[in-house]
Amino acid sequence: MKKVGIVYHPLNKGALVLAQKVADFLGSSGVTCWLCSAWEGQQLSKQVTDTELILTIGGDGTILRTAQALVSHSIPITGINMGRLGFLTELAANEAIEKLPALLAGEGWIDERAMLEVEFDGSEGQTDKKLFVLNDVVIARGEIARIISVEARINDEPLITYKADGVIAATATGSTGYSLACGGPILHPQALQFLLVPIVPHLSLGNALLLPSEAIVKLRVGTIHKAVLSVDGHISLPLAGGDGITIKRSKVITRFLRTSPRDSFYTTLEQKLKG
C-alpha cells in the first residue's frame, strides 16, 4: 500500500497519541499517510483520493462516523480499538503497530457489510436529504416523556401503528447494538436482512421483525407527536407529527479489511457481549 488514512476520536487523548505513532511507523515504511478527526466528515471525504486503507483509532462510534464519510468510496476500514466493546474494530491498541506490516502487505480478507438508505417523506426542508446507515436508524420520542405512535408499512402494505418509545431499523451490523438491548435477535454480520424492533411498546406489537433484504419500510410519526430521528447514534434530526421516512437496503456497502479468522464472530461474541 502506498497511501493510508488515519481517522481518530478527537476527544480521546490516547487515540491521537496512537495515531501519531502509527503515522510515524507508516512514514518510516515508505507509506504516505494523512490524519483526520472522525468528527470532521467533510474534511475526511476530501482527503481520500488514492487512499487504499483507512485506519480508525477509537471505538465503534469512530468507525460509524468514518463509514458515513466514505459512502461514495469503496475504501476498506480497519479499526484499532480504544473504546469499550469494539464490535466493529479489528485490532487492540497494543498490537496495532505489530500487525500493521501484514495489512500493508495486503494480507487479510474483505468483510462487506450491508447498509440501509433513508429518505424523508413529508419532512419540510429535508425532502432532498438521503442518509446512509451502517448500524441503525431510530425514530424515538422527543423531549416529552410520553409514548409516540409510529405507523409502519412494509412494501406499501400496512403493518401496525406502534405505540412505543420508538422504533429501530437495524442492519445485521447493528443487531448487536440498541436493537439487541430492546430484545432483537443477533444476525450474522454479513447477513443482508434487516430488523424492525419496537422500543418499549405499549399495547401494540412487541416482537422484533426480521425483514428480507428487498423489503421497503415506511415509518410515519403520529400527527400530534414530535419525535427525533437518530442515524448511527451521531446524526439527530427532528420529526414533526405527520413526517415519515422510507428505509431500504442500500446499494452502498461498507468494507472492512480483516486479519482475524472469518469465523471469529462466533468465537468472540460472548466475550464482546460481556464487555
Image: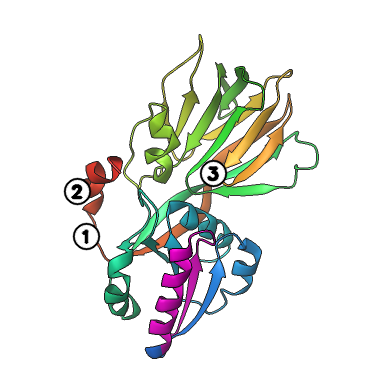
Callout 2 secondary element: helix
Residue 186 picture location, percent across and down? 33, 36
| Residue behind mark 3 | 233
Of tags 1 and 2, the one toward the viewer is: 2
Callout 1 secondary element: loop
Residue 28 vs 137, above or below: the answer is below
Residue 104 vs 55, above or below: the answer is below
Q: Which of 15 and 246 is in front in this view?
A: 15
The furthest residue to the top: 203
**Which kind of residue does numbered mark 2 sit on?**
Thr
**Which kind of residue does numbered mark 1 sit on?**
Pro
Mark 1 Cα within 10 Å, few/some/many (few <14, many 20+)? few
Residue 30 picture location, percent across and down? 41, 91
Residue 33 picture location, percent across and down? 49, 81
Q: Name the side, left or right, on which 237 lies relative to 77.
A: right
Q: Earlier in the sequence, mark 1 or mark 2?
A: 1
| Residue behind mark 2 | 267
* Magenta extent: 1-27
Residue 260 vs 185, above or below: the answer is below
Discs 1, 2 touching: Cβ within 8 Å: yes
Callout 3 secondary element: loop
Dot label at residue 261 = 1
- The answer to if 151 sits in the magenta stretch is no
